[in-house]
Image (spheres, rainbow, N blue to C red):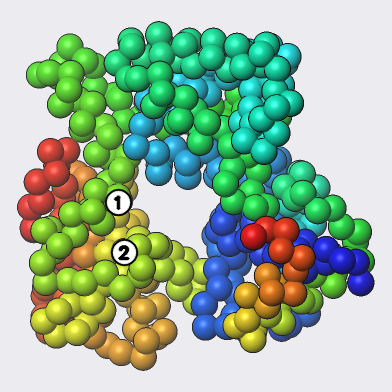
Amino acid sequence: MIIMNDEKMEILYTLITELEKIGCFEIKTTDLERKKIAKLLLEIIEKGSEDELVNRGSGRWL
Amino acid sequence: MRKDFYDAAWERLVALKSYKLISIRNKTFRLTKRGVEFLKHEDKEYYLGKILLMDKFKRTKHPDIFIECFNQFVKLSNKERKAIKKIVLGGYRNFDEISEDDWSVWNEFIVKVYHKLGKKKSKKLIGRICDSSLRSITIGVKAPIDIPIKTLRKILKELKEVENTFNKEKLEEVENKSSFIVKNLLELHIEEIIRKNFKMLFPDLQIIDNGQHYYTKDGNYIDILCKSKKDNSYVVIELKRDRSPSRALVQLLDYMNQVMEEFKTKDVKGILICKNLDRRTKSALKAIRNKLKNPDDISIIEFDLKMGLHKI
């Protein structure tokens, strides 16, 4: 089954929104930020460059 | 863009992967069965908590301490739970902020678990296992201690039911208690045991899934994926802990087909490891094998609870 990128983004957005609703995350985000995060996650998954998130982050999780 | 945008994105990615809601392979992601169930579930906090506890329970080397830790934890007062939370979640970072009262609540908690377990394990070990059972070490993943107490009680009840399904036999019917416990632990940890003893059990095979379930493109996971050292064919191993081997046989055939498509090869074999093979599955297996060029391409291994393996 071919899933279009919009659908993939929607799935990621829904998952992270539901996880945030039940208090999974330390860093809280707005709806717009979650949409941007879903887009970014899809991009880095497709580039195979997940480490980019850590490199561009503040080092908080290191 | 806010400063911690990438931190937030990383936190979410780790959570999605740790809870196994998505699988990422070959630069694409798939929604897993868990992911679908999570989205469908009415009580997502409960579903996620259940995944968290069940996964931790399957991994722990001390299931008795794990269960008793939660048994005692849900019995505590809110004030006591708050004190324990301070120690478990912040103890090492903010050591000085923890009062003597909080430490004494933690010590009393450990002593309760110690007594319930019949003083068979050291307090130090109990403390360590309770601490790791209640905390989370992965970012984005809830600590069990943070699950609302009502939800935790519900999950714990189910966890005990899972444990009970392995304890149907009455102790008096069992020759000796130690073999009874070993039997039930074997069922719970069958995959771990097979992986640990893989070379001995399957000397002709080599695991290629890096010790983790292999996720297929369809979002299913294969218990163990390996390759034959003899002919380099792929071998799918499916473990069935409960009694529905006929469904498991169909599942195995499905996974074999998925591996064939994914790796573009026809050299895929399947092994189903299960308990108590029923007549219908045996008959179905016979029919399939009769049609195969090499009947050994699909085999079923029944495990008995002493971990002897009998090829059929």
Give left or right: position of B81 versus B223. Answer: right
Q: Amino acid under label 2?
A: Ile
The residue lying at 79 percent from left, 76 percent from top is A39
Circle 1 SS class: helix
Q: Quadrant of residue A9?
A: bottom right
Category of crowding for the residue at label 2, using alpha-carbon neighbours closer than 10 angstroms: few (below 14), some (14–19), many (at least 20): many
As drawn, the label of residue B224 is: 2
Front residue (pair B114, B32): B114
Q: Position of residue B112 (x, y in %)?
A: 48, 10
Q: Is residue A49 above or below residue B143?
A: below
Q: Residue at x 70, y 27 (%)?
A: B96
**In which quadrant of the rendered image does the C terminus of chain B lie?**
bottom left
Question: Marks 1 and 2: CB-CB under 8 Å?
Answer: yes
| Mark count | 2
Where is residue B5 shown, x and y percent of the image?
Answer: 83, 66
Q: Could you confirm whether marks 1 and 2 are on the same chain? A: yes
| Cα separation between marks 1 and 2 | 8 Å
Residue B82 rendering spot, x and y as whole percentages: 71, 21
Q: Which residue is mark 1?
A: B191
Which image quarter is the N terminus of chain B in? bottom right
**Who comes first in sequence, dot 1 or dot 2?**
1
Q: Quadrant of residue B129?
A: top left
At label 1, which amino acid type do we have? Glu
Q: Residue at x 19, y 84 (%)?
A: B232
